Amino acid sequence: MSDVISRIKSWFKRDDRGASAVEYALIVALVAGVIGGLVYVLGSRSGDMFQRACKELTTGSAPSNCTPRGTTQGQ
């Protein structure tokens, strides 16, 4: 177990100057994944939020026009 810990410590003590292209690619992939996840989560939530707001605003006898583009009222 102490061998693993000493290897990890020596790995952190390396004297590398600058980052390699692989490290930059990993950072870019991580940032892209985080941004993609946020867009996915917030995109669906914002769509639901707009649908709810539209339904609350269109009360009364006026026909509701809250359907997303490209869909029909019956779906």
Image: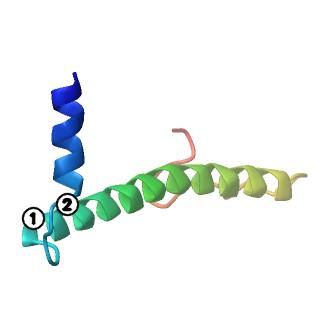
Q: Tell me the distance, in whole angstroms, between the alpha carbons under discs 1 and 2.
A: 6 Å
Q: Residue drawn 60% across and 50% down? A: 45
Instruction: Say which residue label 1 marks.
Output: 22
Q: Residue drawn 84% across and 59% down? A: 57
Q: Residue 28: give x, y in percent of width and height.
A: 24, 67
Q: In which image quadrant can residue 6 be found?
A: top left
Task: Name the one closer to the observer, 8 or 27.
Answer: 8
The furthest residue to the top: 1
The furthest residue to the right: 60
Q: Residues within 10 Å of mark 1 (few under 14, many from 20)?
A: few
Secondary structure category for the residue under label 1: helix
Q: Residue 35: give x, y in percent of width and height.
A: 40, 62
Q: Residue 27: give x, y in percent of width and height.
A: 26, 64
Task: Name the one closer to the observer, 39 or 28.
Answer: 28
Mark 2 and mark 1 in contact (Cβ < 8 Å)?
yes
Q: Residues within 10 Å of mark 2 (few under 14, many from 20)?
A: few
Secondary structure category for the residue under label 2: helix
